Image (cartoon, grey):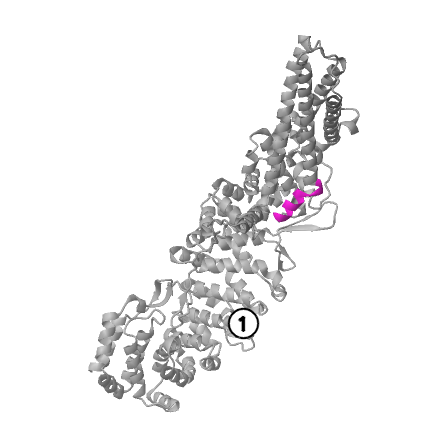
Amino acid sequence: MNHNSSPSESQGSVHLHIFELSAVPTTSLDTKSSTTSSAADASSSLSSARAPEKQLTLFALRLAVLEKTASGIGTLGFIWATVVLLGGFAITLDKTDFWFITIILLIEGTRIFSRSHELELQHQATWSITEAGISTFRAIKTAFSSSRTAKHHTARQLRTDWGEKRPPTRTWMSSEVPLLSYGKWMFISTNVSRVLHWLQLASAVSCVVLSMIKLVHRDFGDMEKDNSDKRNRESALIIFYSLSLSEALLFLLEKAYWEWKLTFYSLLEIVNKECELGDSDLISIRRFFYDAYSKCINGSVFDGLKMDMVSFAMELLSSNSPDENLIGARILRRFATSSQFSQDTLQKIGTSLPVVERLVEMLNWKDEEEEEIRYSAAEILSELASKKHNSLRIAGIAGALESISCLLHRSRGHGRVSDQISEKKKRGQGHSRPWSFNNVGLEILKKLARDHDICGKIGNTKGLLPKIIDFAHADESLLRGPSSETVTVKLSMQVLKMLASTAGAAGRQLRREISEIVLTIGYIRDVLRYGDRHPELQILGIEILTSLAIEEDATERIGATGGVVKELFRIFFNDGIPEEQQHVRAAAGEALAMLALESDSTCRGILKLGLNEQLVTAVEAPLLRVNAARILRNLFAFSGDDCFHHLKGLTAAAPTILEAIMREEGKLLEVMIGAASCMFKFMDHQESRSMFKRVGIRETDLPNRLFLILSKYQQPCIKVPSMRRYTIELAIWLMREEKESVRAFRGLGMARELESVTETTSELESFNIFSGTVGLCRHKVTMLALVDAAMKLLEG
């Protein structure tokens, strides 16, 4: 038996559902322009909601405009003072003007110097070295080369933001570096940054005061109009003091704007909240802002506007610095799992193959300090794999499935499956932070397995299939517990179900390999036996068995595993199952019918269970009768000749089946005719007459019914593909059993209907089961052979 199937809505023959990835609905924004102000406001609001970081890039632009304007005016003032005043009027300047100019130039020079390093030192003072912007970090690295030894301390510092107490390290925190051997408190870079900050403010205020004094009093010394050397001195001084005043005021305005937006308005906190990053990720927002501001200052003022959080995080992810990787991974994980930002984020990541490759590479990292990076990369890939084209891109990366396999690690404790591979205790605290690598790894595989080609790759990945199966193990204590403790088991079984239902040669190979792993069927048996509180697990286990039974060898292994068939019947006959869980009983019946198909050993095992009475009763139950009829047909069709005594007891269901044939339609009619065509052969003439009498129909009524069925189905029907085959089989039995039936068929014109069947028969009627549109498990007797047998009986 080599058949690949799944039960579809049609239930006359067993069909296999093959997973198809449905189109993912996407939403689009209305691009039509609107002239109303309300529409413009709505568009602005939507844009802000979708990209909150735009507030920061706009703020950085405005600051840069003020900064560059002040710097431009300061440069002009410096040139004016050195070239025009000190160069042209140095001898004729009044003493106070000379010293005022000199002091202002010294103050401005000091402020410009401190301003050029303030951003870097402020980063150093407030956070660690890599919490500054990328460009700033490179500048700092040049200025303080000794800080290169701090490779991993910042990753620990970042984790401190999550509530961990940072332990002492063997390397310097950059914000604690003493710049001189003595006076350490004064020369810690944290304090130097503060000194420079206040020095700038003092310098700017001094410039304002000195410039205002001169501009108000206009005391520029003795101005003799006939002295040509002093003729333009007053105008030159007024211009210089005005430039100095303008620069200082612009700088103070910039500082005030900075403080108001960041300190009083809390812009960073607002954007952080809108980005859904959480309080612990405020450092990511700070870093993004300083990078945008640095770009606006160092290049065009518009350079910062080109930045967005996703591209920023992707750049950090590609860095060689572990702490930069951590920040980037955190941002992408938050955005990828956010309902508000996930679509744009995943689209950007998915179109960048280097980033996807980097994420896959991170799955292999083993350093404890990189644990969160690894977990974040796994979650991002899990979200990315939700789209089919992304799944293909991930699976196409060399070593991707091996990397995903590295996430799976079975930890056993007290007979339970641990859903967490790693529980890191927070240093100095009694709390723990678990990273559920197993679950996210299985989730990735589940999404990848929607593509049948990828299923084949999963099966070919060394050691991956046994790992997946290992997580399907759940002992009695776990299965009798709450559903929250069986998440990993459920994910494992979902992946196995998708692998087992794969079509084609890859599917056959997978089913063979799954069934050959000796623990697989035993694990499923435990779920069936102890999992009554978890019907979702039971139905997954049942569906896996149904798919595995497509292969003959797998069917034999399932039948030979003690208790599997018995547990399936227990579920099938269990009337105590709640109404909302009745689908589990139907699935169990379908699995039993599949296991009994063309399997003499399984049929013998079923008969030995002594369930004849229950099977006869099940034919009358509305929920069970379809699958009960399938089981009966397979038992009568494929049991050995020495099972006659056991099968004889099942003929008690014949009256119920005959009555259904006379009254029902559709799928139920098909399976009942199929059961009757095999069962009635085990009844003698007296028993068949008694059956007709008990049902209350004449012996000629059945030929009429079968003729009408063939007349109705002039063409093979996808919903009931075996209807005409089973009808002809039953007609052959009837003509062999009753000569009057032959005359009845002749009078009805059965020969014409049989000729019509010959002209319209197709491969659809040649198989017991189907995998999608592919027929499997071919009937041993062809349709043409059946028609010929029936025609001979009519003619004889």
- 792 and 31: which is toward the camera: 31
Residue matched to label 1: 581
Whether residue 338 sits left or right of residue 793 in the image: it is right
Residue 88 point in image, percent of width and height: 66, 11
Q: Main secondary structure of the magenta part?
A: helix
- 569 and 386: which is toward the camera: 386
Q: Is residue 541 magenta?
A: no
Image quarter of residue 593: bottom left
Quarter the N terminus occupies:
bottom left
Residue 639 point in image, percent of width and height: 39, 74
Whether residue 795 sits left or right of residue 390 in the image: it is left
In the rendered view, tell whether residue 162 sits above or below residue 624: above
Residue 160 point in image, percent of width and height: 70, 42
Q: Residues within 10 Å of mark 1 (few under 14, many from 20)?
A: few
Whether residue 670 sits left or right of residue 474 in the image: it is left
Label 1: state its secondary structure. Answer: helix
Quarter the C terminus occupies:
bottom left
Task: Give the residue type that dot 1 points to.
Answer: Gln
Q: What's the magenta region?
A: 263-275
